Image: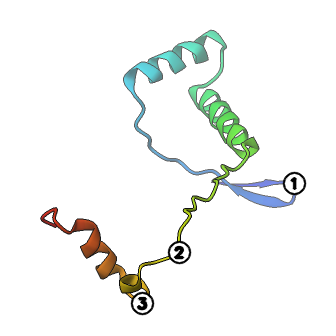
């Protein structure tokens, strides 16, 4: 369904989702008590979750560093396979 709103076409899309039986029963009960459709209740909840997530601060990570003199000479120009072999040495890998 194509809808014209404020100078833009908006598309309404039908989709199928799997929702746990218990959650669906709770949602239907609330929708009935509040005299709203299950669809409007679902959209309201989804909007709230998306807004909350948009307001979250991005996770920050502190870099992990180690004191030392860099790589051992045998690993200076080595590829991934050399690191992997050393990591699994003596462990049957």
Q: Which residue is mark 2?
A: 69
Q: Nearer the viewer, mark 2 or mark 3?
A: 2
> Quadrant of residue 66 in the image?
bottom right
Q: CA distance from mark 2 to mark 3?
A: 15 Å
Mark sitting earlier along the chain (1/3): 1
Under tag 3, what secondary structure? loop
Q: CA distance from mark 1 to mark 2?
A: 63 Å
Q: Quadrant of the C terminus?
A: bottom left
Q: Nearer the viewer, mark 1 or mark 3?
A: 3
Instruction: Name the foreground residue: 39 vs 1.
Output: 39
Q: Of all residues shown, which one is farthest toward the front?
A: 69
Q: Of all residues shown, which one is farthest toward the top?
A: 33
Mark sitting earlier along the chain (1/2): 1
Residue drawn at (73%, 40%), measured in percent from left and top?
51
Under tag 2, what secondary structure? loop
Q: Which mark is residue 6?
A: 1
Residue drawn at (44%, 41%), measured in percent from left and top?
17
Q: Nearer the viewer, mark 1 or mark 2?
A: 2
Instruction: Name the foreground residue: 49 vs 88.
Output: 88
> Quadrant of residue 38 in the image?
top right
Q: Which residue is mark 3?
A: 77
């Amino acid at each position: 369904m194509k809808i014209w709103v404020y100078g833009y076409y908006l598309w309404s899309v039908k989709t199928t989702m799997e929702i746990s039986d218990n959650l669906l029963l709770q949602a239907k009960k609330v929708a009935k008590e509040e005299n709203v459709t299950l669809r409007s209740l679902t959209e309201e909840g989804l909007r709230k979750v998306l807004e909350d997530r948009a307001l979250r601060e991005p996770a920050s990570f502190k870099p992990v560093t180690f004191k030392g003199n860099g790589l051992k000479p045998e690993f200076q120009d080595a590829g991934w396979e050399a690191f992997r072999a050393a990591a699994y040495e003596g462990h049957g890998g």
